[in-house]
Amino acid sequence: MNPDVAADLKDLSGTLESIEAVADLPALRAEIADLSDQAGQPDLWNDTEAAQKVTSRLAHAQGDLRRLEELRRRLEDLPVLYELADEEEGADADAARADADAERAKLREDIAALEVRTLLSGEYDPREALVTIRAEAGGVDAADFAEMLMRMYLRWAERHGYPTDVYDTSYAEEAGIKSATFQVHAPFAYGTLSVEQGTHRLVRISPFDNQGRRQTSFAGVEVAPVVESTDHVEIDEKDLRVDVYRSSGPGGQGVNTTDSAVRLTHIPTGIVVSCQNERSQLQNKATAMAVLQAKLLERQRQEEQARMDALKDTGSSWGNQMRSYVLHPYQMVKDLRTEHEVGNPSAVLDGEIDDFLEAAIRWRRTQAAAD
């Protein structure tokens, strides 16, 4: 085998060993055994919410173990592929070596993607995520852009097999959305998507301008960790204003004949959340309360971070404008923090954002180390 190839395989093996150590394979296998035992209990579904947590965590733990074992198997198979290529002659040898090189490159890419997970070590990083998208400056183009971003994240989740729940969508009058809130049900969804928080900018020829002028519009993304019972986020009922109203669809059309949608206003902070996806007012209020708790938890986390930054005399400047999507006069999506860019906005807006997420997670770790 070529010495350079052998050195590369050794390097890949070392990286994978580090990932396996962080994942703690014996503990992961023990957790799967325990969750499998819980999932097999006859009274599991007496508590639907607890049952869903057990089965979801089991599926993700099994997926994590399967992914690690598959990477290790592929890495152990690679030397065999190169040995088989060395035994071939002429064009057959070249083709076999090219196949082995292609598998090595893909394996490096897959290991690097999994390595990013080991960088998510924040207190709330393992949580599921609540994402809120709001149209900002730019009128109808901003509302349309906000809906494009919502679709981008939902497509990203779909590509990975992560279930999502859309809790509230406030439609704009002409096109697009004023705001939307949805939950991504996957371990480490918060740690992964938290780097998306900030202002996104779109530059394009406006489809809503009859003179065909170029328009710049903005949309904001907020990401909060889903609250767990151990968080103790207390909300005094006296601090809440509760409004009920009818759910509405695009263009303001009513989609519900009863006042089942619920809007909660947290008076001390001014935070407003809504939920209209459940059938009953009681269910919508419970879901809206969970969203409000998550937003208060994220606010608390940001305040703590701000105090830490002040003590270090460093500012966290990456929370504002963070990515540009340019559709005219050229095609490009660029992250303003990491400098990562691609020339295919259509693919990005269709949910292919893993490279941006990985680059931002690595960048954030580097910034934290520098501080």
Image: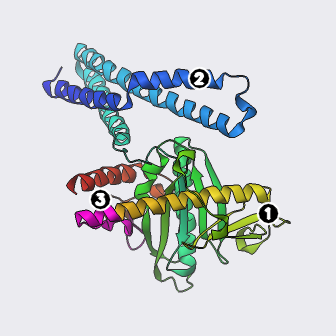
Image side of residue 299 versus residue 176, left or right: left
- In this rendering, the count of numbered labels is 3
State which tag comes first along the sequence, 2 or 3.
Answer: 2
Q: Amino acid at mark 2?
A: Ser
Q: Amino acid at mark 3?
A: Thr
Residue on which the image places disc 1: 260
Q: Amino acid at mark 1?
A: Ser
Q: Residue at coordinates 43% horizontally, 49% vertically from top-left?
A: 192
The magenta segment is: 307-332
Residue on which the image places disc 3: 338
Q: Give the quarter of the image for residue 325.
A: bottom left
Q: How is the image coloured?
A: rainbow
Q: Residue at coordinates 51% horizontally, 82% vertically from top-left?
A: 212
* Vertical comparison of 203 with 305: above or below: below
Residue on which the image places disc 2: 36
Disc 2 from disc 3: Cα separation: 41 Å
Of residues 352 and 290, which is closer to you in this image? 290
Disc 3 from disc 1: Cα separation: 44 Å
Q: Residue at coordinates 40% horizontally, 64% vertically from top-left?
A: 303
Image side of residue 60 versus residue 77, left or right: right
Q: Is residue 335 visible?
A: no
| Residue 202, horizontal then vertical, whole percent | 45, 71
State which tag comes first along the sequence, 3 or 1.
Answer: 1
State which tag comes first along the sequence, 2 or 1.
Answer: 2
Element assignment for label 1:
loop
| Residue 204, horizontal then vertical, whole percent | 46, 74
Q: Is residue 79 magenta?
A: no
